[in-house]
Image (cartoon, coloured by chain):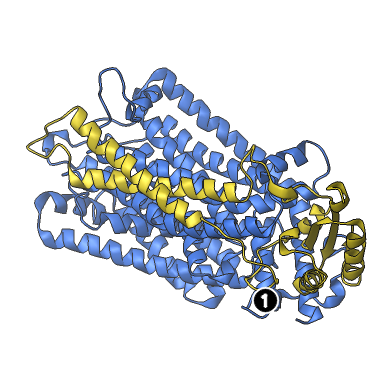
Amino acid sequence: MTAAAQDHLVEAAFESVEDVRSAVEAALDSGVAASQIEVRSPAPLEEGELPLAKPKSRVLLFALSGAVLGGLTAFGLAAGTALAYPLPTGGMSIVAGPPVGVVTYEGTALGLIIMTVLRVLWEGGLLPGRAIRSGRGRPSDFDRHVAEGRLVLRIHGLTESGAEELRELCRPRTVALG
Amino acid sequence: MTDRPQASARALDGELLGRLDRRRPGLLVGSLASGVLVLVFFYCWGYQIANGIGVTGINRPVFWGFYIINFVFWIGISHAGTLISAILRVTKAEWRRPVTRSAEAITLFALAIGGLFPLIHLGRVAIFYYMIPYPNSRMLWPNFRSPLVWDIAAITTYIIGSALYLFLPLIPDAAVMRDRAAAGLKKRFYAVLALGWRGTAQQWHSLEWGIRILAVAIIPVAVSVHTIVSWDFAMTQTPGWKSTIFGPYFVVGAIFSGIAVLMIAMALLRRGLALERFLTDRVFNNLGLLFVTMSLVWGYFTFAEHLTVWYSGDLFEKLVHHVLLHGDFAVPFWTMVVVNLVIPVAVLSFPRGRRPLPTALVGCGVLVGMWLERFLIVVPALSTPRLAYSIGDYMPSWVELGIMIGAVGVFACLYFTFTQLLPIVSVWEMREGWRHAVSGGESGQPSEAAPTSAAASPAAGGGAA
């Protein structure tokens, strides 16, 4: 069988999470792999609402890395520039702790914030130019349903007969099918 | 799950989208009217740039006048959003949902305006770049030991953080607007903002992590910003400024004035956009309770600040204290006490006082009071210095007044424009709240304002499939 023959897509819009859950369970029972299933929702779903693995995220790790990087940069800037052009002021130390601390604190926060946002955009495939893997995240005519508050189930990588079978499974609960 | 709550949530969803789609001439008129003040702002600033800082009333010994007062005032207002929104997110307060977007927008716009005032105060705006740390030809770097340079670091961090904290939760709503807009410029605009958002599980998961981390990170940043602004004063030897409690005192005042703006903005939005079913009485009641609490905390700090000065017996400190309480500045001082403490406590202590109109009116008074507080920190202290021969008065010029009033117009124009272009109530957060309420997780909006299931027609739900 050619790749094109296995590239059929089923899209269905549902009103409630329960309906999507039933459709996903039916799809999994019929032999569809979890990796072929994508659910688009108008709001985040709670963990365990759907019988699918929870996505992974490394936002926290990157946020902490950004904090360290930002803190070190700010420390280097505040302490290094004081040493690069020493300005003796009334017997005070050239690299004074509190001012360096304040600047380091702000740099730490800035690094954390920027890296957090960059990682969120990266993981969500939202950075310009980033290839969206395996058809996920591509625009769909069904996106309008998500905008209207419905949930959209997308199952891809199906054979023609498999796609038709899944459409029949979804049909009783769906408000739109494609 | 029953059909009725589900239908109620769908109906509310459709109603919210309908409200956001509707053209609102009132907002357009507001934008245009505030646009006139924007022109006043830029005319006055341009006049000052062309003629020099001598056109202001700033002179020896009052070197900090309206510009620094307004700088502190607007930075304080900026605490409306990010801090309040972040605290409510971190504490998972369900009633925050209709409030957060508006609060975050207020933060960003107030911060942008507040950040302009030191540049205006510079006179020669172009020399701002002296403060930017870069290796110039003479290896002269900004002096990081100066609290003014800490200001640059803190405000830069806060403005970037606030912009991203507003933008990140806006992405899903931009996608909603994109997918609902007809093809054309509008759709392209929202498509750029949405960055290709589709609402996949990975996107939601990463976004939730991001918002959670930003909410936690932005709180200490907001506190640090106003603390550092207070240190611009407290690190000097000027009588009336050298105070160890200035940091927390400024932060409390900032949150207090921030809530005041939020109350006014929410009352205007509720009436102007007919959002009564989303900005419910419960939201105003809860914000009103927070408001009166901050009023009492502010009163406590003000009392503590003045008690220690009075008790110290320090001649120069008492001189400033005297002109505040009994001298030339007694009228603004006692006005400040009345509008910041007496009226809020008298009105907001009762449930009837925590309705939209009373809270907005109290908010207006508090804004005046908090501006007076900043005025009373800056001017009496500088006009009563240690050296008797340099005692002097300060009278703002029309340029300073024009810039101050114009700044209000800039803020209003930005806010009205934002409200016209983007959902001022976070659609996805409201949906999440309704889902929680429908699934019985927490008490949310539908339980308060649930329409009958008969009203939940497909049209009310946002269109047929």
Q: Which chain is blue?
A: B
- Location of residue A84 by image quarter: top left
Q: Which residue corresponds to the image point at 77% horizontal and 62% vertical from the top-left? A: A149
Query: Residue at label 1?
Result: B437
Q: Which residue corresponds to the image point at 36% horizontal and 31% vertical from the top-left? A: B121
Residue B363 image offset from top left, x and y in percent: 50, 59
- Location of residue B400 by image quarter: top left
Residue B73 image offset from top left, x and y in percent: 40, 47
Q: Which residue corresponds to the image point at 73% horizontal and 52% vertical from the top-left? A: B176
Q: Is residue B423 visible?
A: no
Where, quadrant-wise, is the N terminus of chain B in this rendering? bottom right
Read off the chain for label 1: B
- Please determine whether, in this image, residue B235 is positioned above or below residue B83: above
Is residue B2 left or right of B445 when viewed as pictured? right
Badge 1: residue crowd in 10 Å (few <14, some 14–19, many ≥20): many
Farthest residue in the front direction?
A: A1
Residue A98 image offset from top left, x and y in percent: 21, 47
Q: Is residue B411 visible?
A: yes
Disc 1 residue type? Ala
Viewer-proximal residue among A38 and B355: A38
| Chain A painted colour | yellow
Viewer-proximal residue among B316 and B270: B270
Under tag 1, what secondary structure?
A: helix
Is residue A96 left or right of B264 when viewed as pictured? left
- Please determine whether, in this image, residue B119 is positioned above or below residue A21: above
